[in-house]
Image: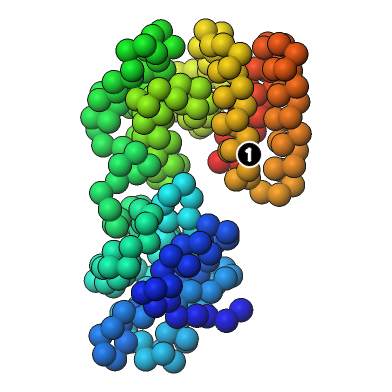
Amino acid sequence: MVASRVLGEDVRSMVRKGARERMCFGFCLDKQNDPLLMVEPGKKPEALRAPLKNEGGGPPMIWGTYVVRSEQMEMICEKVSAKTITGLKKFLRKNQPKVNVLFYDKGGNLLDSLKPEKSDGVVIDDKVSDLAPPGESGKSAQELVKRLKRIHPRIALAPGPLEMKLKRALARSVKLVNDGKLQEAETLITMIEMALAKIGKTIENDKRTQARAQQSRDRMSLGAGVKRAQALRANVARTPGSTRSKLDRAVHKAAQLLKSRDMNGANKMMDRIEKALATIN
């Protein structure tokens, strides 16, 4: 593995690499006080300290790993310096990576971000109260709103890194409801509910959570079931190889059940897929 320097014109290429696999990064200023950013594949970002020095870099340095998911790049800093993170942030902003960039410490605490966080970022307190689903969405949307308001205060009780993930999922759910994408929102909300039930931060157990989700789905059409399967397929595509193959087969089976109009069987199959995804996440 060879470390490579990232110049301004290389930032978007760096983002593309992070979308394919988790990468290591290191950053500091060189002797001319110019930004010096280097990346390489692997799991030992501290190994970039030597290449940074060879390129004329000096302390303070930061290093860690980064990965790109859903239009945002998460940079986990194992070596932290607030001043140096600010320098990296300015360098990235100048070269427009076209994704939001979130800086975390290795404990999962948010340190900084490149842009103000919106739907995929940390949820602000009034995010759920601002829900305004399209009027024509009717009872289905209102049911999802009630579920979101029920789980919102519970997320704060989750441990640090999981809390961050659930807050981003909640914000994404809010946006989906407001955009009228109810089936995608329902799938994501169910995964949040099951994650909370698993760690005991809800008054419901898994069975009651699944029962509540099922009541919501019973109001939806075959077309909504198809959208649910499509949303699950997108989530399955981001899981590890061996697990992905098994879940792909399960999604295919759910699609066959939908085609034969067996909504009950299809929903049971998709319930199991969601439960498996919640366990992985």
Q: Nearer the viewer, residue 127 or 228?
A: 228
Give the residue at x 43% y 76%.
Answer: 6
Q: Which residue is mark 1?
A: 236
Q: Nearer the viewer, residue 124 or 194?
A: 124
Relative to 260, is 79 above or below? Answer: below
Quadrant housing the C terminus:
top right
Quadrant housing the N terminus:
bottom right
Image x and y of residue 53, in percent: 41, 89
**Residue 250 shown left or right of residue 22 in the figure:** right
Q: Residues within 10 Å of mark 1 (few under 14, many from 20)?
A: many
Image x and y of residue 277, in percent: 61, 35
Relative to 96, is 222 above or below? Answer: above
Give the residue at x 28% y 53%.
Answer: 115
Relative to 214, is 246 above or below? Answer: below
**Residue 95 shown left or right of residue 259 in the figure:** left
Q: Quadrant of residue 112?
A: bottom left
Give the residue at x 72% y 36%.
Answer: 248
Disc 1 on helix, strand or loop?
Answer: helix
